[in-house]
Image: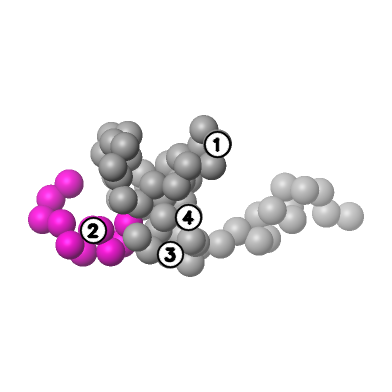
Amino acid sequence: MKNESDISRSYQVPIWHKATLSMEEAMAYTGIGEMTNREDCPFILWNGSKRLIKRQAFDEYILKVYSI
């Protein structure tokens, strides 16, 4: 019988297919961090007190900006 950790590992989705990223995933994906603290950050989704990155919106943002 599989335990919960075996099941969750078998269903892990690659970062490039996720709709939202945890802060840890976003930092591993891009190295961002501090800019997500801004209130006007266009790619942040708050789930209670948990900050998530909208991956597609973030990818579009990265394509438009000169530097971070």
Considering only order in the chain, which callout, 4 or 2, is on the residue closer to the N terminus? 4
Disc 1 designates what residue?
48
The tag on residue 3 is none
Residue type at mark 1 is Gly
Considering only order in the chain, which callout, 3 or 2, is on the residue closer to the N terminus? 3
The magenta region covers: 58-68
Residue type at mark 3 is Trp
Count residues near mark 4 (Cα–Cα under 10 Å), then give few for <14, some for 14-19, many for 20+: many
Q: CA distance from mark 4 to mark 1?
A: 15 Å
Q: CA distance from mark 2 to mark 1?
A: 26 Å
Are dots 2 and 4 in contact, CB under 8 Å?
no
Task: Say which residue appears at 47% left-offset and 55% top-offset.
Answer: 20
Are dots 4 and 1 in contact, CB under 8 Å?
no
- Nearer to the camera, 51 or 67: 51
Disc 3 designates what residue?
16
Disc 2 designates what residue?
62
Q: Is residue 16 visible?
A: yes
Q: CA distance from mark 2 to mark 4?
A: 15 Å
Task: Say which residue appears at 49% left-offset and 61% top-offset.
Answer: 18
Are dots 2 and 1 in contact, CB under 8 Å?
no
- Helix, strand or loop for disc 2: helix
Residue type at mark 4 is Thr
Considering only order in the chain, which callout, 1 or 4, is on the residue closer to the N terminus? 4
Task: Say which residue appears at 77% left-offset and 48% top-offset.
Answer: 4
Q: Where is residue 36 drawn, in percent x and y? A: 32, 40
In which quadrant of the rendered image does the N terminus lie?
A: bottom right
Foreground mark, 2 or 1, reads 1
- Nearer to the camera, 61 or 32: 61
Are dots 2 and 3 in contact, CB under 8 Å?
no
Foreground mark, 3 or 1, reads 1
